[in-house]
Amino acid sequence: MLDEIDSGLDVDALRDVARRVEAMTTEDDLGVLAITHYARLLDELRPDVVHVLMGGRVVQTGGPELAQQLEATGYEGLAAALGVETSVEVAEPDDPFADPMGF
């Protein structure tokens, strides 16, 4: 599992990393789960399958063209096309300075 392996890499470093991962998938028959927010990694790795997650759930699965569609429409556009709610409610944090005894 490669979690945001493209984070902090310049274009040349990303290409080098992607080439090595690609080589391992063919030479060593390695399966890879690559997690990214950016299509540029997928331009280099050439995925077989793309999954899109929203709200912690897979909402769509497809081929490399799905990443291109997502890049063009954004998450909001894809969510609207799928009829998926994109907003997440966040609870108000407790007051860190509140008296724990309630006085």
Image (cartoon, rainbow, N blue to C red):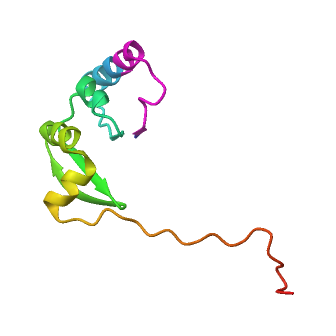
Residue at 80 percent across and 69 percent down: it is 97
Q: Magenta span has 4?
A: yes
Q: Quadrant of the N terminus?
A: top left
Residue at 29 percent across and 37 percent down: it is 31
Image position of 95 with respect to 44: above or below:
below
Image position of 30 with respect to 16: above or below:
below
Frontmost residue, 42 versus 21: 42
Residue at 36 percent across and 64 percent down: it is 87
Count the numbered circles shown. Answer: 0
Rendered image quadrant of residue 79: bottom left
Image position of 29 with respect to 57: above or below:
above
Left or right placement of residue 29 versus residue 13 in this view? left
Left or right placement of residue 94 versus residue 78 in this view? right
Residue extending furthest top? 12
Q: Quadrant of the C terminus?
A: bottom right
Frontmost residue, 100 versus 25: 100
Rendered image quadrant of residue 102: bottom right
Magenta region, residue range: 2-17
Residue 66 drawn at (x, y percent)? 15, 43
Frontmost residue, 91 versus 11: 91
Residue at 82 percent across and 80 percent down: it is 100
Residue 4 drawn at (x, y percent)? 42, 36
Residue 46 drawn at (x, y percent)? 21, 28
Residue 38 drawn at (x, y percent)? 33, 35
